[in-house]
Amino acid sequence: MLSKKQAKIFFLGGTIVFMLIFIGMSVHSLTVGIPEQTNASEINDQVKLGKRLWDRNNCMGCHTIMGEGAYYAPELTRVYSRRGETYIQAVLTAPEGWGFRGRKMVKYDFTDEEVAGLIAFFKWMDKTDLNGFPAEPSLPVSSR
Amino acid sequence: MKYSSQKIAYYFFSFSMLLLVLQITYGFIMAFAHMGYDGLHSIIPFNAAVTIHKNLLVVWILSGFMGAAYYIIPDEADNELWSVPLAKLQFWSFAIVGVVAVAGFHVGWWEGRKFLEIPRPLDFLVAGNVILFLFIILMTLIKGKQQTTTSWVLTMGLVFAALLYLPGMIYFDNLSVDSFFRWWVVHLWVEGVWELIMGGILAYLLIRLTGVDREVIEKWLYVVVGLTFLSGILGTGHHYYYTGGPDYWLMIGGIFSAMEPLAFLAMTVFAVQMYRKGNKKHPNKLALYWTLSTAIVSFLGAGLLGLAHTLPGVNLYTHGTLVTAMHGHLAFWGAYASLVFAIISYSMPLMSGRNIFDNKIGHLAFWCSNIGMVAMTAAFAAAGVAQVYLERIAGFEFMVVANELHAHFFVLILAATLFTTGITFFIVNFIKFGKPTDEALQTEEQFEALKTA
């Protein structure tokens, strides 16, 4: 029968081993995998501005990006290729705040530079390799 | 209670109950907004409501953990708390930071990073506050007459929870890196070190409530928390499937996430077996109900419902949908909210001297809140699955689908009303206990006698 000491060794040994494996994989992901898949070298000042605005305005509090957020407003990972620059600009500069099919967005007073920053951020995000996310709908349009 | 200084736990439990009421209020605001009734949009837009709802959850549960530690550690260490004035200072500073954070969210003072929205200046205050808390707990433990496995597991859980908060305070320009470290905090909290805290509190409650030998309970505690880390650490990988990380996370995250329910199953078997081995004579039936429901519902919510969408092939379609909300609600309720209710139900009679062990209101609180939360989970599940099929598989636009989900949110509101009724009953009981008093002080022998009452 398992003794208390053996149980303690199982806990401490298992934790240390798996923590070391996790740290090793994290180091590889952060130094090789993520920089390559997210085109880290393309993160210029405009993209950085867009990211800061994304955080500062808590866009994740309604939208999702890379599938992370609050499920109240559309997923924006591929919004740049899905909607295009003009549409995004119209949403960000709507004088009374954007509203679509009954759901309202907070009204923002972004400057031209900030709008350009957010668009650059979405353009950068559009090119990231997210291992197949978001998946293409598997039902053909004709079947709807 | 054995020591007068344990009464400080009452401050934290009261604060928890207050924040829980607020959290539920903002939950209703969000549910109505999902149905199209967002009349508060100009005052409390959805992103403010969701941030407040989630952060209140984290803060009230942490407050409950702190209260639990202040109650349990002196009892386990067999000594008074190291410093009551410092503990009171820690409480009031914690409460002030919490209130300022919630007020700030209303005016857009936040970081906009899911679960870690507290702005940077307040982060430093939180860190300072938690350091003070840990210092008091560690000093109590070190200066105590005994150092038990239960108290060390609980304390280490709290120490690592504090350490893991730090990666979340670093800013990254790359959203993917930002997300990577955010999950170090959030995942390694709720599917890692918080389970140490959970295991420690559950072990304490089982020792006190069942009469089973401490050595037996603590041996299995090691096995349970061992399984937690064995699966939970690399299980972090399920957050890295589709957020810019290498594709090996699909395999590693998939395998270890699939093992995560085992840790929760072990927790369930652990609690139920200890109950069955025990003499079942302790009069505090409500505490026992909450203790066992913590172990069982956490397995259903965190374990099984997590497994339901954690495999990469499924998660590709469910990631970023209401399916996650389904899992999140029952998981937090089962694993952590119920746990705080368990320690409150156990400790309040002993701190106040009012033996509310088995009353009707207490049972109504238990059943209404649990049935209400299960029904809420079902409503989220229906909405989530419908969203996945319509949006992700059939390719309809987000808002087209969102407008088809109103009926599910109506059901959610009905279920949440039942849940809120249960919470109201629990709070009525909590108020009926009144304030802790030194007249309730008891000896270890009197506690032991309770187990065979």
Image (spheres, coloured by chain):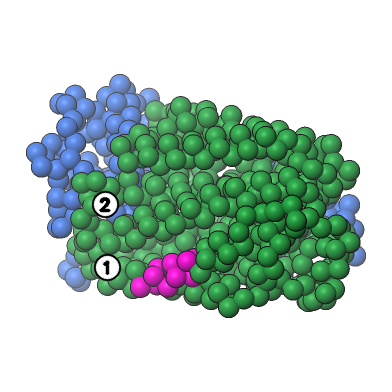
Chain colours: A blue, B green
The kind of residue on which mark 2 rests is Ala
Pointer 2: residues within 10 angstroms few (<14), some, or many (20+)?
many
Determine which of the numbered discs, if any, sits on residue A73 in the image.
2
In the image, which residues are magenta? B414-424
Q: Secondary structure at mark 2?
A: loop
State the residue lying farthest toward the front. Answer: B439
Question: Are tags 2 and 1 found on a single chain?
Answer: no
From the image, tell me which residue sits under label 1.
B405
C-alpha separation, residue under disc 2 versus residue under disc 1: 13 Å
Q: For the point 63% across and 59% down, which residue is it?
A: B344
Q: For the point 53% across and 30% down, which residue is it?
A: B125
Pointer 1: residues within 10 angstroms few (<14), some, or many (20+)?
some
Q: Is residue B321 left or right of residue B133?
A: left
Q: Nearer the viewer, residue B404 or B272?
A: B272
Q: For the point 29% across and 31% down, which residue is it?
A: A53
Determine which of the numbered discs, if any, sits on residue B278 in the image.
none
Q: Nearer the viewer, residue B359 or B396?
A: B359
Q: Position of residue B384 (x, y in %)?
A: 36, 65
Q: Position of residue B52 (x, y in %)?
A: 39, 47
Q: Position of residue B313 (x, y in %)?
A: 45, 60
Magenta segment includes B120: no
The kind of residue on which mark 1 rests is Leu
Q: Is residue B61 left or right of residue B319?
A: right
